[in-house]
Image (tube, grey):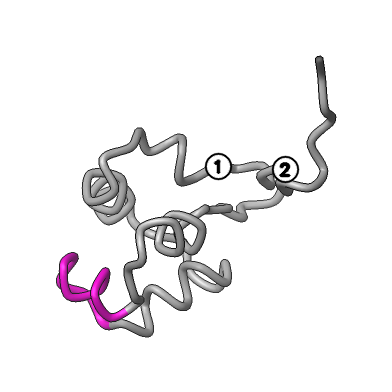
Amino acid sequence: MSENVYNRISVLRAERGISRRQLADALGVHYQTIGYLERGEYSPSLHLALRIAEFFEVAVEVLFSTAPFPRIGDREHTG
């Protein structure tokens, strides 16, 4: 069983025009930590995951998952 934690941090940052450094400063972490998180090289503590979700004002499940998120282009169109 894999212990990977997948996230959408970069997607939310891009949508909101926030740099890695700005997010890091708001969270009180080093900006490289944000890069490690986005690349999946580091899994956040529960506390940090909750703080990131709080920063973006979304549920933690919107940002983090134990399964890969579907790519936007991979979604089937209905209608």
In-image side of 56 versus 10 (left or right): left
Relative to 58, is 25 above or below? Answer: below
- Per the image, is 25 magenta? yes
**Residue 31's spot in the image, x, y percent?**
31, 82
Relative to 15, is 63 above or below? Answer: above
In-image side of 37 versus 33 (left or right): right
In-image side of 20 versus 68 (left or right): left
Q: Amino acid at mark 2?
A: Pro
Q: Residue at x 37, y 84 (%)?
A: 32
Q: Residue at x 48, y 69 (%)?
A: 42
In-image side of 66 versus 15 (left or right): right
Q: In whole angstroms, how far apart are the C-alphas of marks 2 and 1?
A: 11 Å
**Residue 49's spot in the image, x, y percent?**
33, 51
Front residue of 77/54: it is 77
Which numbered circle lies on residue 45? none
Relative to 25, is 43 above or below? Answer: above
Q: Callout 2: 10 Å neighbours few (<14), some, many (20+)?
A: few
Q: Amino acid at mark 1?
A: Ser
Q: Residue at x 29, y 53 (%)?
A: 52
**Residue 15's spot in the image, x, y percent?**
44, 56
- Residue receiving disc 2: 70
Secondary element under disc 1, as helix, strand or loop, is strand
Q: Which residues are magenta?
A: 21-30
Which numbered circle lies on residue 65? 1
Front residue of 58/39: it is 58
Relative to 77, is 62 above or below? Answer: below
Upstream in sequence: badge 2 or badge 1: 1
Which corner quadrant holds the C terminus? top right
Q: Residue at x 16, y 67 (%)?
A: 26
Secondary element under disc 2, as helix, strand or loop, is loop
Q: Residue furthest top?
A: 79
Which corner quadrant holds the N terminus? top right
